Amino acid sequence: MSNIIAIVGRPNVGKSTLFNRLTESRKAIVDDLSGVTRDRHYGVGEWTDKQFTVIDTGGYVANSEDVYEAAIREQVMIAIEEASVLIFMVDVTTGITDLDDDIAQVLRKSNKPVFVTANKVDNTALHSEISTFYGFGLGEVFPLSSMTGSGTGELLDEIIKNF
Ligand code: GDP
Ligand code: MG
């Protein structure tokens, strides 16, 4: 249970894009461990001298809004148990949604370090928009563009201090 980063957040914020970036050098090593891990992917990454496992959560299958939210909540709970550090990803282009608030509530109750990450900050003009996410009460908000990779280094520098 050491050096494990889980990426949580509602669908479409960019979790898998970041996962692919962080695990670029090595391909996913574990998949479909059991039924319960069906919706998660595991990969290995490294930053400076630290190696870590990354968990991408997602792939929610549900047929109603309620089931969908429950499935996401379940994934977040499992991630909290499995991970040593959590990346809570939100989307700067949409701001805070109800589902974001829901996930934040679960994360606030965890005793794990949470890194609020505002994704899709593709240019500096969007930097000022991240302040809204301080409203979660989960500490510093890291601007990121999973697409360009901008902000990844700053985020990982802070995360690996926990390893
Ligand atoms: P997930 O559902 O949270 O895993 O999100 P994905 O990684 O599948 O990304 C959802 C969509 O957002 C895709 O169309 C991505 O190309 C897009 N996306 C991801 N990261 C960024 C980013 O940094 N900037 C922009 N503009 N789009 C992004
Ligand atoms: Mg995904």
Image (cartoon, grey):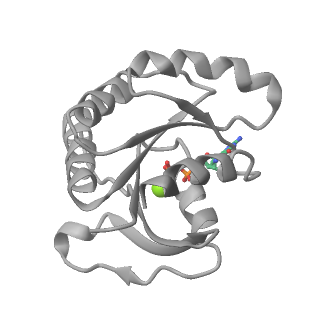
Q: Nearer the viewer, residue 59 or 75?
A: 75
Residue 125 locus on image (x, y percent)? 81, 23
Query: Which of the 4 quarters of the picture holds residue 64?
Result: top left
Q: How many marks?
A: 0
Residue at coordinates 54% horizontally, 30% vertically from top-left?
Answer: 141
In the rendered image, which quarter contains the C terminus?
bottom left
Left or right relative to 148: residue 20: left
Q: Residue furthest right?
A: 124
159 or 149: nearer the eye?
159
Q: Is residue 83 above or below residue 45?
A: above
Q: Position of residue 127 (x, y in %)?
A: 72, 25
Residue 2, can we see it? yes
Query: In the figure, residue 58 lies in which quadrant?
Result: bottom left
As drawn, is 59 to the left or to the right of 37?
Answer: right
Residue 146 visible in image: no
Position of 96 with respect to 75 (left or right) is: right
Q: Which residue is rendered at x = 54% and y = 61% of the image?
A: 19
> Looking at the picture, does residue 91 appear above or below residue 16?
above
Q: Residue at x 81, y 33 (%)?
A: 123
Q: Give residue 157's position: percent from left, percent from top.
A: 60, 52
Please identify the quadrant where the N terminus is shown.
bottom left
Residue 52: % across, % down: 46, 70
